[in-house]
Amino acid sequence: MSAAKLADLKGKRVAIVDGYSYGTASEMAGPTYVRAGSEEDSLTRLLKGTVDYTLMDDLVVQSIASTYPEDAAARLQIGSTPLLRRDLSFAVRRSRPDAEAIISKFNAQLRGMMADRTYNQVLHMDWIRADVNGDGVPELIAGSDHPGPAQPMKAYSLFAEPDQVKGPGNAPGFYVGGTLYSDWASVPDSYKTGASPVPDPRRASGTIFTYKW
């Protein structure tokens, strides 16, 4: 069953992680929620059939799909439409005399982490989607200098708001090897040789996600 909003799942059992914030009761109206102890627990419940769906962060979903591609393809149907979008913001007390400077330095540091691929490494994502050059338009940022021959079909977005797009045919730009390219065809072939290795299921991805199939 495909759903565009949570209300479409009325009467269905949906696993959510106890202690996570998903929004107000009115925004969550529709399904019957089953509280799980962790992301792993919620997936286990889904695989055992004690719930009909599980609501997961996109980072977790992409981690599962990339780390366990065969199991995920065989046993999971992953939705393509986000059912919730939530922002996570860094805030500073406005009365601080250096508040603006702190925010500016924080944003600059984040942009540096995007450009030097620290974000890719921390999240263990081959591709992330973010505004690397500060022009307000997100690009697709490669996690290595050899992302492989194929244009990425999926990238983890660092920000919850719907992304803007640019370039011919509404295609995003690509940031590879420290240079921003307007389209995939413009990325030099030297970057398209080889590919990132298959992720190690034992590694951490933000927090540790290890699943038993």
Image: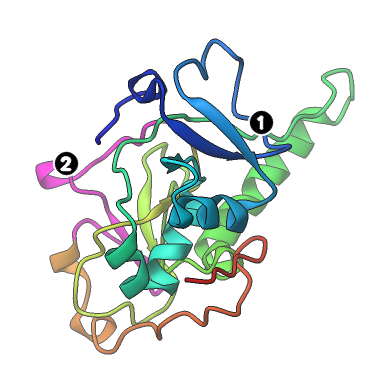
Q: Position of residue 24 (x, y in %)?
A: 61, 16
Vertical comparison of 172 with 2: above or below: below
- First in residue order: circle 2 vs circle 1: 1
Say which element carries label 1: loop
Q: Kindly give the residue lying farthest to the bottom in the view shown.
A: 194
- Magenta span of residues: 162-183
Specify the quadrant that holds the N terminus: top left
Q: Is residue 211 left or right of residue 4?
A: right
What residue lies at 85% left-to-right and 31% top-to-bottom? Answer: 98
Mark nearest the camera among 2 and 1 is 1
Q: Is residue 180 magenta?
A: yes
Q: Residue furthest right?
A: 96
Answer left or right for 181 relative to 139. Answer: left
Please determine whether, in this image, residue 22 is positioned above or below residue 176: above
List x then y, in percent, for residue 156: 42, 53
Residue found at the far top of this picture: 26
Measured Cα–Cα span from mark 2 to mark 1: 33 Å
Q: Quadrant of residue 86?
A: top right
Left or right, 103 with reference to 161? right
Residue in view at x 40 percent, y 61 percent? 141
Question: Mark 2 is on which residue type?
Answer: Asn
Callout 1: few (<14), some (14-19), or many (20+) C-alpha neighbours within 10 Å? few
Q: Nearer the viewer, residue 26 or 165?
A: 26
Q: How many marks?
A: 2
> Residue at horizontal 89%, vertical 24%?
96
Residue for badge 2? 170
Q: Nearer the viewer, residue 3 or 101?
A: 3
Observer-nearest of 46 and 125: 46
Q: Amino acid at mark 1?
A: Ser
Residue at 38 percent of width and 82 percent of height = 196
The image shows residue 33, relative to residue 105, as above or below, that is above
